[in-house]
Image (cartoon, rainbow, N blue to C red):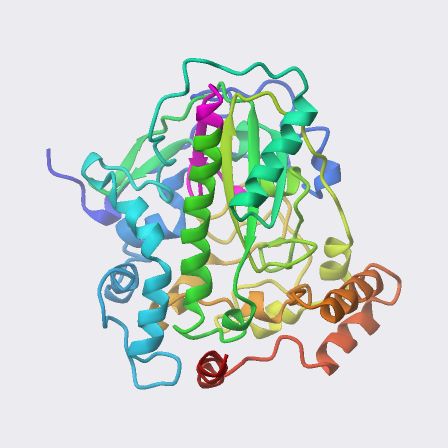
Amino acid sequence: MAAPAPNRLTVEKQPLTEGPFRLKGEVRRPTDADCGFEVLDTFERFNQCNDIYSRAQWDERVRSKKAIDWFKGMFMPGLGVKKSEGYGIKDFALRNAGWMGTNLVIQRSLDQDRVDGFGDYIRPYSAPNAQKIEVSDAAAMSEEIKRVSRLFGADDVGITPFDPRWHYTDNFSIKTLTQKPYKFPDDLPNVIVIVTSMHYEAVKCYPSATAGIAVGHGYSKDCELVQSIATYILNLGYRALASVNDSSQAIPYAIQAGLGEYGRNGLLITKDFGPRVRIGRIYTDLPLAHDRPKRFGVREFCETTCRRCADACPPKAISHGPPTEEVPTQSQTKGIRKWQVEPERCFKFWSNQGTECGVCMRVCPYNKDISRWWSRLYYRFWQRLAASPFKRLALKLDVALGFGKRMKPGEFWRRFRTR
């Protein structure tokens, strides 16, 4: 049977009481208040086909030659190269090299209509060990998993219960450009959430292809990291599914696991790296203790004081207003009151320049380099100031000291060559 035309895909709405995960009782959870979530009775689980990257392949309102070239550009040398600084051959070469680890994972199951790590969870390389270790202390095992995660490269780790609200109703098929059944087990009660930081100076170069190394290599590191953690658990005799940008919405899980707060720019804001992180998850039946959400003043700072991301956003996709449940496009989850970012405007800008944009990440006052003792000391002082009644002073100080300014890609390369 021939696949329907890309703009004819019908995305069906699935009630909360149907499908692979059935929600019982209230839509809201006891921890939502601690997370800063405002989940309403109108909440609907999200269909992956409505994700902006999926729509760029089937929905002609988003699909364009530039959008398709954006996807191809990570695999095809020279695609997107311009004469502008930051968009030359070496800039795209660096970006594409960063994506190499991710691309190997993506391509391993394409013949089976799977996009491991980005459309579907990453298939385990082996079954669990038939000899299962006994876990008598879930809290002790949680600490062990966190140590193992950091050994493999995680910058922070949290553990939270499985929450069906953040899982998709259906997956997107790249083979037929239609939706396919969501096949994800519902008996893995624990979710290990990891975050890894991205290169600080590369992020300072946004927008440019040079900066793309931060995202591409960030995803490649995460793909290796979550599979390493999952493999460790499988060898202990328990089930584990590794996930990067697939299967569920990552930010709510990260917030529930105590790794950060939701920001005006629509990103997870972590305490150490601000929004400059990638998020991975491992779903498992290994007995583990759960962490609690942690608030450190991000919502209050974004809501009452800071508009830097909204002011700097090139396509004006970030709201200057308060959190709202109104969603401007179908690429957003219904029934959650939060800051709404317009993905269509955002992705169009990405497509037009041939590489992703991270300006909102660069200018965020929570984006700091803490690799030196004095920068870590300053950042902790600034965070306390931003969480105090002197929020405006914190913002003025951040601007006055030049944080968030763009680094020219040529300067990035100069520093790279002199190291």
Q: Quadrant of the N terminus?
A: top left
For the point 33% across and 63% down, which residue is it? 97
Residue 377 locus on image (x, y percent): 78, 66
Q: Is residue 126 above or below residue 409?
A: above
How many marks the image carries: the answer is 0
Residue 32 locus on image (x, y percent): 70, 35
Q: Quadrant of residue 130?
A: top left
Viewer-side residue, 81 vs 303:
81
- Name, please, the residue furthest toward the left: 1
Q: Is residue 354 visible?
A: no
- Name, please, the residue furthest toward the right: 389
Residue 408 locus on image (x, y percent): 49, 84
Q: Is residue 183 visible?
A: yes
Residue 284 locus on image (x, y percent): 51, 25
Q: Quadrant of residue 375?
A: bottom right
Viewer-side residue, 253 vs 89:
89
Q: Is residue 370 above or below residue 28?
A: below
- Taking the image as shown, residue 408 lies to the left or right of residue 176, namely right
For the point 68% across and 81% down, which residue is it? 402
Q: Quadrant of residue 172?
A: top left
For the point 49% across and 47% down, which residue is it? 332
Q: Is residue 235 magenta?
A: yes
Q: Is residue 380 above or below residue 325?
A: below
- Taking the image as shown, residue 104 lies to the left or right of residue 379, namely left
For the point 25% across and 45% down, which residue is it? 107
- Taking the image as shown, residue 75 lies to the left or right of residue 379, namely left
Q: Is residue 73 above or below residue 124?
A: below
Q: Is residue 358 magenta?
A: no
Magenta segment, which residues? 233-252
